[in-house]
Image (tube, rainbow, N blue to C red):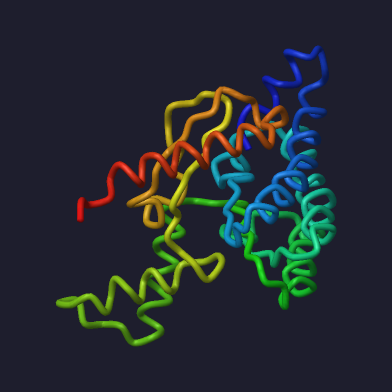
Amino acid sequence: MDGNRRWARAAGHDPRLGHRAGAEHVGDFLSWLAARGIGHATIYVLSADNIRKRAGAEIDHLFHLVETVLPEKVMESGSWRLHVSGDLRLLPDPTRAALEQAIEATRSRPRHLTLAIGYDPRGDIVAGVRAAVRAGAIDISGDQLEAAITDGLPGGPVKEIDLVIRASGEQRISGFFPWQTQHAEIHVSPRMWPAFTERDLDRALADYATRRASAAPMT
């Protein structure tokens, strides 16, 4: 969800309006994915570094959006089950409670949405390792440990990410789920996140399909 502040400044708005527009845009994005039969999505909302480094007033506003707008959009979607990857201890109690309530309320839904909130890429992998150890996967000589770490990563049931869409033209991955994106294709869109359209999504999906088709082995 990159480019919210730049989108707001370009339109002459307070940057906080950009963050709100970006959060509300999640609802549109989820409906577009569902219409295309996509059942697993991961959205990078707020990193642990964002929480630690941004000014108090700005981060408080982001917490408010995470507490109010994002759970509301997920609930309104009707078909998306919420998962969160990140350290929820970094969030204020009401924000954490709102997310936990939405996680519980959507538990029976068929599609899976992972929101990265308070996310740290190394912490994500550490969580997977800890889960693997708890599961008894201690045979480091074979594939058992790697598979157990993958299964133990936070988030939805499908861990491997096929396509990363980077909004706002940035040419970097920014620590986005390094374990899960090992084989992912990356599509960079010049659009700021609040201006990202359904047509932009189709461009990204077409780009992905073309790359995968060209990479397929000849038969």
Quadrant position of residue 122: bottom left
For the C terminus, the image quarter is: bottom left
Residue 38 x, y percent position in the rendering: 60, 57
Q: Residue at x 58, y 55 (%)?
A: 41
For the N terminus, the image quarter is: top right
Figure check: 85 above or below 205: below
Q: Residue at x 80, y 36 (%)?
A: 20
Figure check: 150 above or below 19: below
Figure check: 61 above or below 41: above
Residue 119 x, y percent position in the rendering: 55, 51
Q: Residue at x 76, y 41 (%)?
A: 23
Q: Is residue 139 left or right of residue 71?
A: left
Residue 84 x, y percent position in the rendering: 62, 61
Q: Residue furthest front?
A: 219
Q: Residue at x 32, y 74 (%)?
A: 147
Q: Residue furthest bottom?
A: 136
Between 194 and 217, the one lying in front of the other is: 217
Between 166 and 16, the one lying in front of the other is: 166
Q: Is residue 154 left or right of residue 192?
A: left
Q: Residue furthest left?
A: 141
Between 195 and 133, the one lying in front of the other is: 195
Counting every numbered tag in the picture gives: 0
